[in-house]
């Protein structure tokens, strides 16, 4: 994004990640998504008088995993605090969070953009409980669903190191990948389990003082994050250039208009009246506890990317694409155990399998059969047209492609004599197309090739066929 009048943007992101525990953070209510409103609630998560919260140990384990995966320092001693504020979706009028002693701090995530590679600092990762959800309805007005109250969260707070929408997007993608590979969350944006607040201010390039920031709340789409940043940056620049001042406030991003709107003045820490939660003991971890959790973390995206590039010869782009979903990356690693044609296998994943998938990875084809398909193409037994046809059939029924090619005579025609005869036959009936091609109409050549491929039932080697046709039109063959 081009800077306006040399104003740079200073961005920090607060990412809220719902943890994939079976029960809530302080009670035994289910965390499953999509239940009837207000059915996953109890006196504890509603904060009724006399109840006592009990910390879910898995929440601490998962938060530590996130901290270790993002190069954070893990606190041996931390505590939980009450953050007091009044809002309709917060029945007990306070949220149990962490204030001055977070579980994880001083980490970083490395991002890559076309312009550079840089580290984005992570100030802290702390645990907290989620609030409920307001549902707006034209008939009934605003309703409250408390199922989400008490669902465990980690909040990942970045340093204000991000300088463009592209860097923000890259950071969110990288963070999402890391979280997915640790297995602590499903990171489903559409279910609110990976959402972020955007803090943005502006200053003249070269200045060191921060400007007044605004916060845009609860954006659950990377694309919308980019749009919100672009709009808010432009709004702040225009405001200052016209002699106005940016006010510290919380703003809402409207998806339909692509604009941000003021919601309320921004609260500071003293507005929340933090104090240690009297019902919860401190969280104490030993070096042995931290080491045990560290040993549970498998390969993270950066390690896998290096392996994909060095061991399989894939590009950075192909590696990143395959690594976007951990299940897909693991399945790809199974496939390449059975074929030496890693790049071809990767292309099948990126161009064919990903097109058949939406939110979650799914492939009904066994790794061995998918590897055979890659090998058949790599060894020029079949061409790309046949590969596509076989893939579609294999998606419907997991057939052995090698047996199918042999049984149905689908092997590619590489014989130059046979292909030369096909070209001669097609050229006799394509005088106008040949003339059009010689007159500079490239599509005429494609039409001739298409006709010739049709004559061979789509089995001709397209490289040899193109070469023969070119030579015959030029009179060289």
Image (cartoon, grey):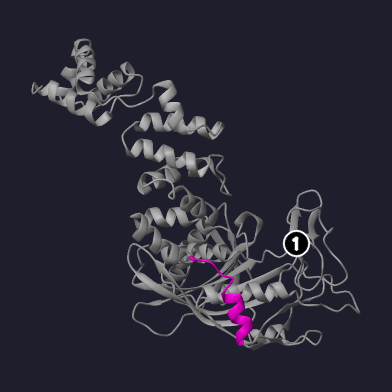
User: Looking at the rendering, in which quadrant would you find the N terminus?
Assistant: bottom left
- Measured as percent of width and height from the top left, residue 134 is found at 74, 60
| Magenta-colored stretch includes residue 451 | no
Residue 204 lies left or right of residue 284; in this view the side is: left
| Magenta-colored stretch includes residue 296 | yes
Which residue is at 23% across, 14% downward?
A: 426
Q: Quadrant of residue 111?
A: bottom left
- Measured as percent of width and height from the top left, residue 252 is found at 60, 64
The answer to whether residue 421 is seen in the rendering is: yes
User: Between residues 346 and 250, which one lies in front from this camera angle?
Assistant: 346
Farthest-out residue, top: 429
- Measured as percent of width and height from the top left, residue 315 is found at 34, 55
Residue 162 lies left or right of residue 377; in this view the side is: right
Q: Is residue 202 above or below residue 229?
A: below
Q: Quadrant of residue 447?
A: top left
User: Between residues 333 and 145, which one lies in front from this camera angle?
Assistant: 333
Which residue is at 70% across, 72% downward?
A: 58
Q: Quadrant of residue 281?
A: bottom right
Residue 292 lies left or right of residue 337; in this view the side is: right
For disc 1, the marked residue is 31
Assess disc 1: are there few (<14), some (14-19) or many (≥20) residues with their C-alpha within 10 Å of its C-alpha.
many
User: Between residues 234 and 88, which one lies in front from this camera angle?
Assistant: 88
User: Looking at the rendering, in which quadrant would you find the C terminus?
Assistant: top left
Farthest-out residue, right: 50
Residue 30 lies left or right of residue 397; in this view the side is: right
- Which contiguous range is marked in magenta? 287-300
Q: How many marks?
A: 1
Q: Is residue 271 above or below residue 429?
A: below
Label 1, secondary structure: give it.
loop
- Measured as percent of width and height from the top left, residue 387 is found at 40, 33
The answer to whether residue 234 is seen in the rendering is: no
């Amino acid at each position: 994004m081009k800077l306006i009048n040399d104003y740079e943007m200073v961005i920090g992101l607060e990412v809220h990640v719902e943890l994939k525990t079976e029960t809530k953070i302080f009670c035994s209510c289910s965390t499953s998504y999509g239940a009837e409103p207000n059915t996953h609630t109890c006196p504890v998560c509603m904060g009724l008088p006399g109840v006592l919260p009990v910390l879910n140990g898995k929440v601490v384990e998962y938060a530590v995993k996130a901290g270790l995966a993002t190069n954070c320092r893990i606190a041996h001693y931390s505590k939980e605090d009450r953050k007091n504020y009044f809002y309709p979706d917060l029945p007990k009028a306070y949220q149990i969070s962490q204030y001055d002693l977070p579980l994880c701090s001083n980490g970083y995530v490395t991002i890559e953009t076309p312009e550079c590679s840089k580290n984005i600092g992570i100030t802290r990762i702390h645990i907290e409980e989620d609030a409920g959800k307001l549902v707006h309805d034209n008939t009934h007005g605003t309703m409250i669903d408390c199922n989400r109250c008490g669902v465990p969260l980690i909040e990942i707070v970045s340093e204000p190191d991000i300088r463009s929408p592209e860097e923000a997007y890259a950071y969110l993608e990288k963070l999402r990948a890391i979280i997915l590979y640790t297995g602590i969350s499903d990171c489903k944006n559409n279910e609110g389990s990976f959402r972020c607040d955007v803090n943005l201010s502006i200053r003249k390039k070269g200045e060191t003082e921060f400007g007044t920031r605004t916060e845009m709340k609860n954006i659950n789409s990377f694309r919308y994050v980019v749009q919100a940043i672009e709009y808010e940056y432009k709004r702040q620049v225009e405001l200052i250039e016209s002699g106005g001042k940016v006010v510290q406030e919380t703003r809402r991003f409207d998806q339909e208009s692509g604009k941000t709107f003021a919601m309320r003045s921004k609260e500071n820490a003293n507005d929340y009246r933090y104090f240690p939660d009297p019902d919860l003991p401190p969280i104490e971890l030993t070096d042995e506890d931290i080491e045990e959790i560290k040993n549970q973390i498998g390969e993270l995206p950066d390690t896998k990317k290096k392996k994909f590039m060095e061991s399989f010869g894939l590009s950075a782009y192909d590696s990143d694409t395959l690594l976007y979903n951990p299940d897909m990356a693991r399945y790809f690693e199974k496939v390449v155990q059975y074929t030496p044609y890693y790049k071809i296998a990767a292309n099948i994943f990126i161009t064919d399998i990903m097109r058949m998938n939406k939110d979650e990875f799914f492939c009904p084809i066994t790794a061995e059969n998918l590897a055979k398909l890659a090998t058949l193409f790599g060894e020029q037994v079949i061409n790309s047209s046949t590969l596509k046809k076989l893939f579609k059939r294999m998606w419907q029924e997991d057939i052995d492609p090698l047996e199918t090619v042999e049984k149905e005579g689908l092997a590619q025609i590489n014989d130059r004599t046979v292909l030369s005869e096909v070209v001669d036959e097609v050229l006799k009936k394509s005088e106008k197309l040949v003339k059009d091609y010689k007159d500079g109409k490239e599509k005429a050549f494609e039409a001739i090739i298409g006709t010739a491929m049709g004559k061979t039932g789509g089995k001709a080697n397209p490289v040899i066929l193109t070469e023969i046709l070119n030579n015959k039109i030029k009179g060289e063959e």
